[in-house]
Image (tube, rainbow, N blue to C red):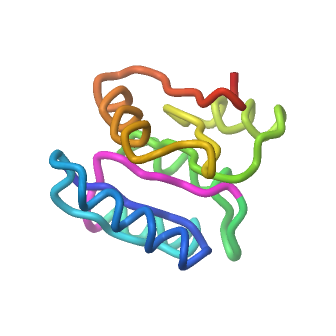
Amino acid sequence: MKVLVADDNVIVRMGLTKLLREIAEVDEVYEAGDGQEAIDVSKKVLPDIVLLDVRMPRLGGLDALPVLSERSKVIMLTSLDDRSTIAMAMERGAAGYLVHGSIDSNQIAGAIATCLQGGLVLGPEAV
């Protein structure tokens, strides 16, 4: 499967990319530094899953989400855990909402598998 990681924090992107490459089902990993770049990359590579941050420069994740969710399953992966942001993400097409720092590689792999099978993934903060 193809996964796109969209986060403006280079360290977060690098860490997620490394983690994703260790998941057997993941064949290709792409990166984007903001929502507009995520849209541009997704049009070219058609990822199965997008891991999308909420706050990014140029175009934030919540604004990019409706476009990205037309082609791919999108899991919001962010540090924000406020109810209004979570509700807005779900309304705009997110298939999941996870707060990083409280999840490990097995949980990310499970979340990806669940979303690909049509399920909804919510971390404890989002519930």
Position of 65 compared to 21: left or right?
Answer: right
Where residue 59 sits: x, y (%)?
66, 68
Q: Judge by depth and name the residue closer to the eye, 76 or 127.
A: 127
Position of 57 compared to 30: left or right?
Answer: right
Q: Which residue is drawn at 72% across and 31% down?
A: 125
Q: Judge by depth and name the residue closer to the eye, 102 or 56.
A: 102
Q: Residue at x 47, y 52 (%)?
A: 51
- Residue 78 is one of the magenta-drawn residues: no
Vertical comparison of 34 with 5: above or below: below
Quadrant for residue 94, please give it: top right
Where residue 103 sits: x, y (%)?
54, 43
Where residue 82 sits: x, y (%)?
83, 39
Residue furthest to the bottom: 10
Could you tell me which quadrant the C terminus lies in? top right
Q: Residue at x 50, y 27 (%)?
A: 121
Where residue 6 sits: x, y (%)?
50, 64
The magenta segment is: 44-54
Q: Residue at x 50, y 42 (%)?
A: 75
- Residue 52 is one of the magenta-drawn residues: yes
Quadrant for residue 9, please give it: bottom right
